[in-house]
Amino acid sequence: MKRLLITGAAGALGQMLRERLAPMAEVLRLSDISDLGRPAKNEEVFTCDLANEEAVFDIVADCDGIVHLGGVSVERSFDQISPANLRGVYNLYEAARVNGMPRILFASTNHTIGFYKQDQRLHASDPVRPDGLYGVSKVFGEAMARMYYDKFGQETAIVRIGSCTPEPKDWRALGSWFSHDDFVSLIGTVFRVPRLGCPIIWGASKNDAGWWDNSAAGYLGWEPQDNAADHLDRIVSEVPRPAKNAPVAVYQGGSFTAEPIHREKK
Amino acid sequence: MKRLLITGAAGALGQMLRERLAPMAEVLRLSDISDLGRPAKNEEVFTCDLANEEAVFDIVADCDGIVHLGGVSVERSFDQISPANLRGVYNLYEAARVNGMPRILFASTNHTIGFYKQDQRLHASDPVRPDGLYGVSKVFGEAMARMYYDKFGQETAIVRIGSCTPEPKDWRALGSWFSHDDFVSLIGTVFRVPRLGCPIIWGASKNDAGWWDNSAAGYLGWEPQDNAADHLDRIVSEVPRPAKNAPVAVYQGGSFTAEPIHREKK
Amino acid sequence: MKRLLITGAAGALGQMLRERLAPMAEVLRLSDISDLGRPAKNEEVFTCDLANEEAVFDIVADCDGIVHLGGVSVERSFDQISPANLRGVYNLYEAARVNGMPRILFASTNHTIGFYKQDQRLHASDPVRPDGLYGVSKVFGEAMARMYYDKFGQETAIVRIGSCTPEPKDWRALGSWFSHDDFVSLIGTVFRVPRLGCPIIWGASKNDAGWWDNSAAGYLGWEPQDNAADHLDRIVSEVPRPAKNAPVAVYQGGSFTAEPIHREKK
Amino acid sequence: MKRLLITGAAGALGQMLRERLAPMAEVLRLSDISDLGRPAKNEEVFTCDLANEEAVFDIVADCDGIVHLGGVSVERSFDQISPANLRGVYNLYEAARVNGMPRILFASTNHTIGFYKQDQRLHASDPVRPDGLYGVSKVFGEAMARMYYDKFGQETAIVRIGSCTPEPKDWRALGSWFSHDDFVSLIGTVFRVPRLGCPIIWGASKNDAGWWDNSAAGYLGWEPQDNAADHLDRIVSEVPRPAKNAPVAVYQGGSFTAEPIHREKK
Amino acid sequence: MKRLLITGAAGALGQMLRERLAPMAEVLRLSDISDLGRPAKNEEVFTCDLANEEAVFDIVADCDGIVHLGGVSVERSFDQISPANLRGVYNLYEAARVNGMPRILFASTNHTIGFYKQDQRLHASDPVRPDGLYGVSKVFGEAMARMYYDKFGQETAIVRIGSCTPEPKDWRALGSWFSHDDFVSLIGTVFRVPRLGCPIIWGASKNDAGWWDNSAAGYLGWEPQDNAADHLDRIVSEVPRPAKNAPVAVYQGGSFTAEPIHREKK
Amino acid sequence: MKRLLITGAAGALGQMLRERLAPMAEVLRLSDISDLGRPAKNEEVFTCDLANEEAVFDIVADCDGIVHLGGVSVERSFDQISPANLRGVYNLYEAARVNGMPRILFASTNHTIGFYKQDQRLHASDPVRPDGLYGVSKVFGEAMARMYYDKFGQETAIVRIGSCTPEPKDWRALGSWFSHDDFVSLIGTVFRVPRLGCPIIWGASKNDAGWWDNSAAGYLGWEPQDNAADHLDRIVSEVPRPAKNAPVAVYQGGSFTAEPIHREKK
């Protein structure tokens, strides 16, 4: 690729990918509403509010691929989520449509299906059950991606990210962990395959205790290599076992299911 | 019921239901952003912008049931759709949550699945395939309803309305027609059953050529009585048969699938 | 048929069928542990404890068909359920096996699946979820029937009876009602078809609000004719609507799900 | 339609349709290898060996629709089946392709799935299980139809005809009967709908004891009106009940399953 | 765990687990109707007839976990199977319910589904097809477990044990083998996971030629490590290949399907 | 095995198997319409036109197993395909039936389902979608195999061969590659298992990017060992990436889907 855009590049995953994806494109274009520091060689840096249509058109122009991490990624108020996660997603797809339709990886989340229980095996085609306003906003984004694919042929990899951390940190992560290496290899696959389509992909490593069946996206040929079970001993010895009725042991979305609706103080 | 709220009561369906639902509650509370005329006896009339949180709390207070028709119901620009169909839906559910969780009928649409072809039979659990920004906004609303049900127990009947007209008007309506009588009887059922849950219900009559399998909502006991096939002779003789590759003959969403993205002139 | 055996003929259903099935066979053989009164013309009357192997062999001998209603049909202690519903069922199948394998209608119950919720549509192939010891005993009986079919070719109609009363008596019965006429017509079908096999049949009328999909047994050609919805107005006006979280409104097994384990006083 | 071709018009079904379909087109073109008698007004009559490519091109030219009944329709030797049912079908599709692709109704058969048992409910998507060389030849024809649809857009209604007789004649027909009226109404539907596609349609009336689920073709809006169960009393009184293990009581294909391979004497 | 109960500890599997599970709990409580020998350090030994309610309450008291192997595990007469496998299971669940509901591993069997053919792939949700009275008794036990889970929250791992032997001993075991190591690791998993629920788990190693899909229990994170195919050469060279129509080659339950009903001599 | 017949032994796959299968039988009988060269020790060589019934009976006589590769294996005219692929298959099955029913491996093809898209995961039970006359002829062969199994018990392994080449040669082969080693091991399995039945087996290696789910044939215990992904780097660097809308990137059948109907010049 000539130019790969990473939105939300100042966030935790953004920083990791800024480093790891450098070899994947001649130019890495980074955008965030927060400070991104000084560009490295081969980097372009943009400050961008995703809710600003013009700004989004600017960052998308001339890109061959987009890793869209930008927006709110935890439970927040509607006022906080709406600008980037609703309007911002619309802006991104419109910008892509009029700029040659570069392939997009859309960072969705397991919180689109967080209210399923941990003893249920899910396929990409199962109905959504978001666990909060954040999850609802990502359902909106997934629907936007699908509509642009059906109407215009815009390709997107919808990645429902699990628990993307350097190591699995708790009992729930035995099912939901998504290693950095596996995320990076998935991105490589997404931008390499001749035809992507618009699959929903479970962003998770090949965890023994995983809940998600990725066979619908099997045609991509992506095979995660890491397994949270390799960290089982550490978790057993270091992390208290949750009660069997704790949300974090019951629901795939874990503690998000127990969050209240956040409302602005007035 | 003591007080039933109809939002979007000035629209075509709203006017029809204003008349038909009068016997269903002691007071019919009507709201719209447009003029609703003078209240009849037993009517309360509110002018309300659904994007205005306070206004929405006012109309929801003291209601026992809500028929939520309000918002944009055709393909429009994001700026036109967003206030009522995104923020407005959030406002409505928050208002319901803090006002005793009256049962809600949410008017969704077949345009959440408009890109399925007409030779495919759909179940309520099939993935969405919206056919435009309007369809995407309704996917958002459906997700909001589901989240409030899973998190708080708020009951909603999500009704994916087909072609709700006095009579089926074209070839596509042989599959998608939803008669006024059937809509009214569905509303009666929704507010009568002891337990509603949060089903997705196909809002269509029992058309011979229907595409939608309502068995997942069968427990409600609602049985539509009308059948577009009773109007077949008229349609055959009066309405030109579309070409086999015309969007209106190919897709369940019909001509919506061929609409461009509407953008504001600047 | 020459001789049709009805076990449990002194129970409520047994008495009804004693009258209604008389035209179906030259001789009606009736058995019960309770008093059956004086035999009518063309009746044979046996007092029989189903737990008594010899007695069961006696009543089965020379029969062409068996309607097995005998045993406990409500929630009771294990000591009360076990003799007739466990050993008794074994006795019946052994007796049938060595007596020419007359076709059997086995009265099972919706309480084999009582813990499914009322918003779930069930097929005959769905896993059991019994709602008490009675339901567990009927799962045992169904398994016995299936085993004798697979091993020996013994045919059985396993009928999971819903609410078999002259009229539907409450809100739950809108889904579960099984009219006497429909039960009688089912029995006629079961003993008429050239090949029965060993189907699980939902014993319910064609209720608008039914939960059970009988398509797996469709090959029998039995079509129930009654519909609890025809009694809707009466129920709405006479029977208080249950709370949405009451077991009778939540579970297909209704109040049985809330029964404790009955234990003998000692 | 201007000109509708019926192949195999001298056979039993052909003669019936010759009479019944007359009002459906300005000209009825009839072809058969056997004598068709003198053409009525508005009829064209062709003697045609379906294995003869040129002859087939001649009969297809200038037609708007084709009802393809031609070929062998019972179990015969490979030498007898092959010319019309293999080469003949290829000839027909090539002729259609180069002659404007008139819509085709292809008369397939339940003998493509004859080895399924009568207690199994089938969908159009279930794998084939032909019950003889005749059934195998029809699987070939169905595959040809599907290939021409996928490759060229040629539309075909693949109709798996059950037991198409004036009245149901035996116990098996309680499941498989296809009344003449229902066949005629199906043909009307096939040539009326704006978009046909290439569905597999079970050619059967709405028999209470039917085995075949037509929901995949539901979008056509065809609803059979007849029911073999209306003839139940006659069959019970006049037709001996088959033994439970007789092929005609076990398999959907009935006695065809017990036919040997027919081989030519040499 | 403080105290782990193993019932049926004098049987073949019981002896193996007595040795292998010692490290898993501070105290291993062993019970059997047969002699268990002298307790090792950290062992408690009980002689117990499972049909004796009081005795069962005694062994269950103060346990944190139960591995329930007790009862008859081959085809026997109803009189032999009933005490431990029917009443005994009821006794165990009642004892657990009133003693703090320790987690239970219930040793069920592949003979609950023994009449499925070896070319069919089974999921935990497939209907049972027991191959004898023993299999029927285990269906009863599985239903009891499920009912206590739905009604009281009692957790059970229902393990349908295949062929649990040190090495696979015949051709059928290429599909059904369950190595001792894999059983032990499964037990470790069952008592370690935060939330068990009430899954049906296929007790089999990861055999290339396995019939059983364990994905429904995948959330537990148990991955068997052994594979009967590693013993293929030995079996090919030492064990005669069964005829293709022998029960042991046709049915998953193998020779059990050909057992008669065992009846007591009188 | 005593005598294993390979038909089509002069073709590319035939030559490979002639070498690789030598150890599998005492005598390798080879047949082809083309020259097979001189027989090696332990080889028998037959020139045989598969359309010739007598000749086929000759080659089948006295064989214990058959690997049927014979016939046309690319898109050709109907006249070229018909003799070997239609009549030839019939001849083979008749010859097998009257010669002790030796087990058959029938070389079918992915072109029976070539019109499925590459983002669809297929099971053996999915409906066929052939991509040309060649694919249609193989659907015919598969149906013949199934009919002889249902009617006579003749066992066949229907192998839908993917891209069987020494190494994967293009992007499509990342999904469809079938290594020679894996084909050989499959043949070993097919002739070793006690009971084969009549499974459809996807002839493909365990490619990361595979489209085909072989679980329905899992009972055989065949596990492919090769993976086209091990050749990914070479393909990426040497083979141009196809356009996302090229048939070879869209359809499982690749370029076959774009072939015209081949017709003889006259």
Image (cartoon, coloured by chain):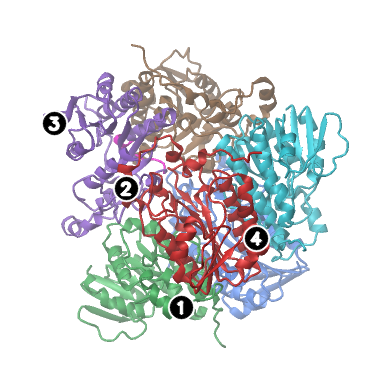
Chain colours: A brown, B purple, C red, D green, E cyan, F blue
What is the distance, in whole Å, between disc 4 and disc 3 at their CAs?
71 Å
For this rendering, which residue is in front, B189 or F153? B189
Mark 2 or 3: in front is: 2
What's the mark number on residue C232?
2
Name the kind of residue labelled 1 in the image.
Val
Name the kind of residue labelled 2 in the image.
Leu
Local crowd size for mark 4, using a 10 Å CA cut-off: few (<14), some (14–19), many (≥20): many
Q: Which x, y percent locates residue D42?
A: 20, 78
Do badges 1 and 4 share one subunit?
A: no
- Tell me if label 2 and label 1 are in contact, CB under 8 Å: no
Residue under label 1: D74
Do badges 4 and 2 share one subunit?
A: yes
Name the kind of residue labelled 4 in the image.
Asn
Residue span colored magenta: B126-135
SS category of the residue bearing label 3:
loop
What is the distance, in whole Å, between disc 1 and disc 4 at their CAs?
49 Å
Q: Is residue F49 visible?
A: no
For this rendering, which residue is in front, C129 or B228? C129
Q: Which x, y percent locates residue B113?
A: 35, 42
Q: Is residue C239 left or right of residue A164?
A: left
Q: Which chain does tag 2 point to? A: C
Local crowd size for mark 1, using a 10 Å CA cut-off: few (<14), some (14–19), many (≥20): some
What's the mark number on residue C91?
4
Q: Which chain does tag 3 point to? A: B
Q: Which x, y percent locates residue C126?
A: 52, 49
Q: Is residue E193 magenta?
A: no
Q: Is residue F248 left or right of residue C206?
A: right
In the rendered view, tell whether residue C257 sits above or below residue D133: above
Local crowd size for mark 3, using a 10 Å CA cut-off: few (<14), some (14–19), many (≥20): few
Do badges 2 and 1 share one subunit?
A: no
SS category of the residue bearing label 2:
helix
Mark 4 or 3: in front is: 4
